[in-house]
Image (cartoon, rainbow, N blue to C red):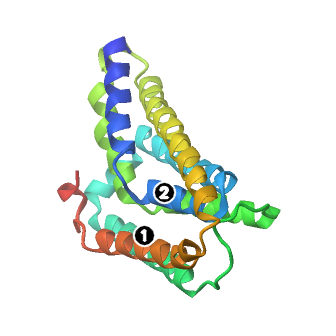
Amino acid sequence: MNVSDVISVAAISLGLVITPGPNMMYIVSRTIAQGRYAGVVSLGGVAVGAVVFVMVTNFGLAALLRTVPVLYTSFKIAGVAYLGWLAWQAFRTDGATVFAPREMSETSTRRLFLMGLVTNLLNPKIALLYLSLIPQFVNPRAGHVLLQGFAFGGIQIVVSVSTNLLFIMVAGTLSEFLATRPTWLRAQRYVTGAALGVLALLLATGPSHPSAST
C-alpha cells in the first residue's frame, strides 16, 4: 500500500459514512432514544457486521451477490421486514420518557448490539460496497493481496466508527436538550417510527439486482 491509496480509501469512506443510510439512522435514533451508551453499543454491533463483510469480501464469497440474484433478493426482503418491524415497535411503544438516558440491563445491552449487527448484515449494499471499493486499490504486484484487502477494509471501518462516534456525541447532546421538552418527548416515537418506515420503503423500492446498485 502507498500513502495516496490509504488517503483515497479514507476519503471515499468518509464521504460514504456521512451520507445518511440505515446504519447511521439506526445509531442516531438509538442514541436520541436511550442515550450515548446505547448509541455506542449499537455502533459496536454495526462495526462487527462491517468486519464480517470485510472477511466475506476478501475471501471472495461476496461475489455470490452478483452472480446469484435470488440471494440478493433474499437479503433485501429480510432487510425490509426487519426495518418494518422496528418501525412498528416504535409506533406501538408507550409514552415513557425515552429521551432520558437510563441504565440498561445486560439483556438490553445485548439486544442493542444484536440489532446494530443485524441492521448492518441485512443491508446487501454494504457487501457490494466492499466488493466494489477494496479491489480498486489492491495491487497484485505488491504481493500479500489478502493482507492488502484486510488493511483497506480496516481503514474503512476505522473511518466509519470514528465518524459515527461523533454523530453519537452530537445526538447525545440533542437527547439531553429534548429530554426537558414534553412535546418533543411525545412526538419522538412517531418520528423514529416514520424514519424507520421510510428506510424500509426505500430499501423495498431499490434496485432488484445488485448490478443496478451503486
Tell me what residue is drawn at x 76 percent, y 62 percent.
102
Label 1–label 2 contact, CB within 8 A: no
Callout 2: SS: helix
Image position of 212 (left or right of 188):
left
Dot 1 amino acid type: Gly
Residue 58 at x, y = what percent? 43, 37
Examine the rendered structure and indicate whether residue 24 appears above or below residue 134.
below
Examine the rendered structure and indicate whether residue 129 appears above or below residue 178.
above
Image position of 109 (left or right of 144):
right
Residue 158 at x, y = what percent? 51, 33
The mark that comes first in sequence, 1 or 2, is 1
Dot 2 amino acid type: Asn
Residue wearing tag 1: 79
Residue wearing tag 2: 120
Tell me what residue is drawn at x 38 percent, y 20 percent.
6
Q: Which mark is residue 99?
A: none
Q: CA distance from mark 1 to mark 2?
A: 9 Å
- Asked if residue 82 can be seen in this view, the reply is no
Residue 168 at x, y = what percent? 56, 48
Tell me what residue is drawn at x 65 percent, y 51 percent.
36
Q: Choose between 64 and 123: the one closer to the eye.
A: 123
- Asked if residue 133 can be seen in this view, the reply is yes
Would you identify the image quadrant in which residue 66 lies?
A: bottom left
Q: Choose between 52 and 113: the one closer to the eye.
A: 113
Q: Around disc 1, counting alpha carbons within 10 Å, would you say few (fewer than 14), some (14 to 19), or many (20 or more)?
A: many
Examine the rendered structure and indicate whether residue 162 appears above or below residue 211.
above
Examine the rendered structure and indicate whether residue 150 appears above or below residue 34.
above
Point out the image quarter for the N terminus. Answer: top left
Q: Around disc 2, counting alpha carbons within 10 Å, would you say few (fewer than 14), some (14 to 19), or many (20 or more)?
A: many
